[in-house]
Amino acid sequence: MDEGDRAVRNLTYHLFVDLGRAPTVADVAAAAGSTTAEVGASWHRLHDAHALVLQPDTTELRMANPFSAVATPYRVHADDRWWFANCAWDAFGICAALRVDGRIETTCAECADSIVCEVVDQRPDDGELLFHCLVPAARWWDDIVFT
Amino acid sequence: MRWVDGRAPGVTLPVGTLSRLAHLWWGDRLDPDWRPRTRDQNQALLESLGLMGDFWRLA
């Protein structure tokens, strides 16, 4: 990853947090003083490097991990905002990235029961909960949305 | 488990371990000097939490 792509990646992440939503390619181009074509090309390289995830065949963000650009069953209240995470791992990751406590709301994938978990000082308040990881690590990026 | 839908069952982690993993894995994502970790750095991070064996071996 060259310095130009790293700068675009960092700007994309910071806009995501500042805006409270996924930035568009035009948002990033305007903030960078660049063109949408240049930012789009950078995003595709970053996607290939697993530094962010684009919607298939588009220049629209799907993930700036741990943040999700689309609604998911993993909602996180942190830093006075609600966010969507890509999975339970990423839900804790939003607290980690923002370096704040938070509240995770989701449902059990097995029984559909509601789950609420407060994260305080990096620790969940309910230590009885289990995280199920279905896909082996070597295959996480075969289909990151499914993973 | 119904939602596994016939796939290999995967693994479960206590949520406390998951939170520690998430804070190690994602804690640097908004750092101004963020740089991508190497595969070996990521593997070492998993191993630091005892996540070893075939399931946790990165590509």
Image: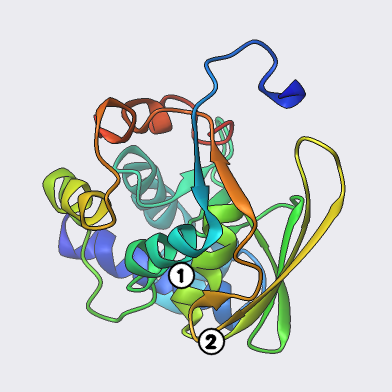
SS label for mark 1? helix
Residue extending farthest front: A128
- What's the amino acid at mark 1? Tyr
Q: Are marks 2 and 1 on the same chain?
A: yes
Number of disc labels: 2
SS label for mark 2? loop
Chain that bears disc 2: A
The dot on residue A13 is 1
Residue A127 position in % (x across, y down) = 59, 65
Q: Residues within 10 Å of mark 1 (few under 14, many from 20)?
A: many
Instruction: Reply above or below: B12 against A74.
Output: above
Q: Residue at x 38, y 25 (%)?
A: A139
Q: Residue at x 52, y 16 (%)?
A: B8
Residue A87 visible in rendering = no
Chain that bears disc 1: A
Residue A3 position in % (x across, y down) = 17, 65
Colour logic: rainbow
In front: A35, or A25? Answer: A25
Residue with the mark numbered 2: A100
Q: Position of A106 compared to B34: left or right?
A: right
Contact (Cβ within 8 Å) of mark 2 with mark 1: no
Residue A104 position in % (x across, y down) = 70, 68
Instruction: Reply above or below: A2 against A80.
Output: above
Q: Residue at x 52, y 54 (%)?
A: B14
- The earlier-in-sequence mark between 2 and 1 is 1
Q: Position of B18 compared to A7: left or right?
A: right
- What's the amino acid at mark 2? Val
Q: Residue at x 43, y 51 (%)?
A: A52
Disc 2 from disc 1: Cα separation: 17 Å
- Which tag is nearer the camera, tag 2 or tag 1? 2
